[in-house]
Amino acid sequence: MARYKDEQCRICRREGQKLFLKGSRCYSDKCSVTRRNYAPGQHGQKRTKLSEYGTQLREKQKTRSFYGVGEKQFRKYYEMASMKKGITGTVLLQILESRLDNVVYRLGFGVSRPQARQLVTHGNFEVNGVKTDIASYLVKPGDVITIRENRKDNGVIKANMEAGSARPVPEWLDFDNKKLTAKVVRLVNREEIDLPVEEHLIIELYSK
């Protein structure tokens, strides 16, 4: 997400559910959604009924927050998805899942997508043997993601891999745990995306 400088837990509270933006904290009793399950701000505890537009907007904002994508780039992804064959909502999620920072997160190198994004932008990874430090880089089937040779002793990555992850590596990624390399086998299927997203609401919003 483009330079969001406020407290990340406020995003989760605004959406009313955990978006897992802070790694292990989200699984603990310190999670803000667990302690204060209402929207932030002085009017946060008031119950308001969302309009159809409001529901669609919140779904879009929630999805943007999950993947850490700015509005301009998110709309670009929608336009890309609308021009491809298939169900637009599913294609949109496939594009979001294909971002390099998301792939690094799915492989367990980062405990959260924000941390995975930072690891990518700091130049820790290669795609097909080429240093790639662009978090929004879209991988495709056949691409091989590896940790750069001089970054294999990165303390954050080592700690995350040694600690293990409750998230299993998805089947669309072939991961070699010993060599710390992964290959994109295919595009993700909709049923493999474990996020509570109703993508049809996003498509309805952009289609207006």
Image (cartoon, rainbow, N blue to C red):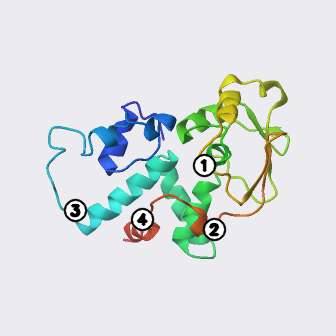
Q: Quadrant of residue 58?
A: bottom left
Q: Nearer the viewer, residue 36 or 58?
A: 36
Which quadrant, please, contains the C terminus? Answer: bottom left
Inspect the image, locate mark 2, and give the three-letter code of the amino acid beneath it.
Asn
Q: Secondary structure at mark 1?
A: loop
Q: Which mark is residue 189?
A: 2
Inspect the image, locate mark 4, and give the three-letter code of the amino acid beneath it.
Ile
Q: Judge depth for marks 3 and 2 and give the one in front.
A: 2
Q: Residue beneath label 1, please? A: 167
Density class for disc 3 (Cα within 10 Å; few <14, some 14-19, many ≥20) is: few
Q: Quadrant of residue 187?
A: bottom right
Density class for disc 4 (Cα within 10 Å; few <14, some 14-19, many ≥20) is: many
Q: Nearer the viewer, residue 11 or 123?
A: 11
Q: Are marks 2 and 1 in contact (CB under 8 Å)?
A: no
Q: CA distance from mark 3 to mark 2?
A: 31 Å
Q: Quadrant of residue 117?
A: top right
Density class for disc 2 (Cα within 10 Å; few <14, some 14-19, many ≥20) is: few
Residue 55: percent from left, percent from top? 30, 63
Give the mark nearest the N terminus, 4 or 1: 1
Q: Which mark is residue 50?
A: 3
Give the mark nearest the N terminus, 2 or 1: 1
Density class for disc 1 (Cα within 10 Å; few <14, some 14-19, many ≥20) is: few
Q: Secondary structure at mark 4?
A: helix
Q: CA distance from mark 1 to mark 3?
A: 33 Å
Q: Judge depth for marks 4 and 1 and give the one in front.
A: 1
Asked if residue 145 can be seen in this view, the reply is no
Q: Judge depth for marks 1 and 3 and give the one in front.
A: 1
Q: Which mark is residue 202?
A: 4
Number of numbered discs present?
Answer: 4
Q: CA distance from mark 4 to mark 1?
A: 26 Å
Q: Secondary structure at mark 3?
A: loop
- State the residue at coordinates (36%, 31%): 6
